[in-house]
Image (cartoon, grey):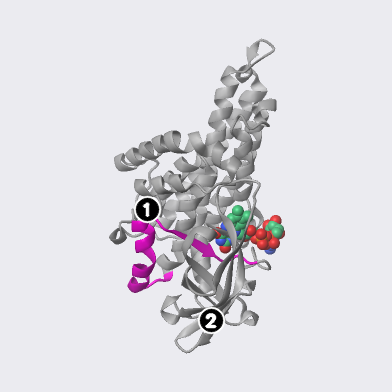
Amino acid sequence: MGFGFTYDEDQLSLQRTVRKFTDNEIIPVRQHYDETEQFPWPEVKKMHELGIHCMNAPEQYNGMAFSNVTLCMVTEEICRGCLGIAITPLANMLASEPVLYGGTPEQWDWWFPSICQEGKLASYAVTEPGAGSDVANIATTCRRDGDYYLINGVKIFITNGRHADKFTVLATHDRSKGNRAQSFFMVDAKTEGVSIGKSEHKMGMRCSETSEVIFDNVRVHKSMRLGEEGDGFKLAMKAFNSSRPFIAAASVGVAQGAFEVARDYARERKAFGKNIASFQAVQFMLADMAMEIEASRLLYQKAAWLLDEKLMAADLSAMSKCFAADMAMRTTTNAVQILGGYGFCRDYPVEKMMRDSKILQIFEGTSQIQRVIIGKSVIG
Ligand SMILES: Cc1cc2nc3c(=O)[nH]c(=O)nc-3n(C[C@H](O)[C@H](O)[C@H](O)COP(=O)(O)OP(=O)(O)OC[C@H]3O[C@@H](n4cnc5c(N)ncnc54)[C@H](O)[C@@H]3O)c2cc1C
């Protein structure tokens, strides 16, 4: 088993393609979508045409079946442009993780074709009003009724929620039994009893759709359950272990975008008769940004590589996400600082990047929860 620090020719070519796409198709429209909060359907369709709509989907459904290393590389490139636009395909991937880990071939046949071929969207529905970090404590129930389950409960903050064609939904058979009594289900959004509640107006990632999804006596056949009864929590944790490196890559993308704006601005902006880039205080901020971006990139690449080698490491996944998300918050904040008053205004993209970054420390496990996971691992 080898270890390398370079992408191969195919990966480099893909990276160039996605970088060009980001420059030409995402960066010019990001401010419009941030201000209007419109869902970016045209860009979502273009990402589907480019093949990055659900990057972990298997090849037999026209999916790209990218390795984790490759899909993280692509994620960094699109998030350099706009996290709000890029989050839609990332949510498709997250929703698909429990299906990839727990699904049978028949279940894959039900889940993937509409996403891969028709460009439909999917959502991962775990969080509830009373349980976010504490996944073991969810209250949505799944009660067995012959060959069916009846799902009842409310999920909140669901990315893609209003536009999703299908959901992966975590529910409990018996809340008093905690995480051992949970199951994951695939649910068609058109099933009777599924409805969408309010959409959130957010600080950042404003064009992405985040909504409440309500399950009111939703009848789901037992063939839609992923894995055995009681496997739900395990599948949720596997999904998070796989998704955290790509959220780390998204963080690196946002930070890289902010760094580039700040560096270019510092080269041009004059104060006291000099370019501000010539002041050591500014140079050191840029140096710290570059150093921390590179360290975060290496960490997500290692976490992704471990996943590809089937050496899934929950602590490394958590480290990559936590380190990169905290770094993105610092880097975008310093990018605003380097642009001074202009940084605080909407004519430049760094204030948006700073607002967007905040979510990276919150979803798919807050930075505190990542430290809980890492802490448990280091103390054995
Ligand atoms: C824009 C957006 C999109 C989202 N998309 C999705 C989605 O698609 N699907 C989905 O299921 N969920 C989604 N979420 C939900 C997200 O994953 C949760 O918000 C997140 O896990 C935190 O849960 P919470 O909001 O309930 O906060 P809480 O769990 O209530 O945490 C509040 C605070 O307490 C801290 N805390 C909690 N427990 C501990 C502990 N043990 N030790 C130390 N500190 C702790 C947290 O770090 C945090 O600072 C999304 C959220 C947002 C805002």
Depth-wise, is mark 1 or mark 2 nearer the camera? Answer: 2
Tell me the residue that label 2 is attached to. Answer: 150
Which residue in the protein does label 1 denote?
A: 67
User: Disc 1 to disc 2, how far (Cα)?
Assistant: 36 Å
Label 1, secondary structure: give it.
loop
Residue at x 58%, y 23% (from the top left corner) = 265
On screen, residue 27 above or below 363: above
Q: Residues within 10 Å of mark 1 (few under 14, many from 20)?
A: some
Residue 68 drawn in magenta: no
Look at 47% across and 84% down and name the residue there: 148
The residue nearer to you, when weighing 117 against 349, is: 117
Image position, residue 38 (x, y; %): 55, 47
Q: Is 359 located above or below residue 258 in the figure?
A: below
- The image shows residue 101 at horizontal and vertical percentages of 42, 67
* Magenta highlight range: 102-128
Looking at marks 1 and 2 on the same chain, the residue that comes earlier in the sequence is marked by: 1
- Which amino acid is tagged 2? Leu
Query: What residue lies at 68% left-to-right and 68% top-to-bottom?
Result: 130
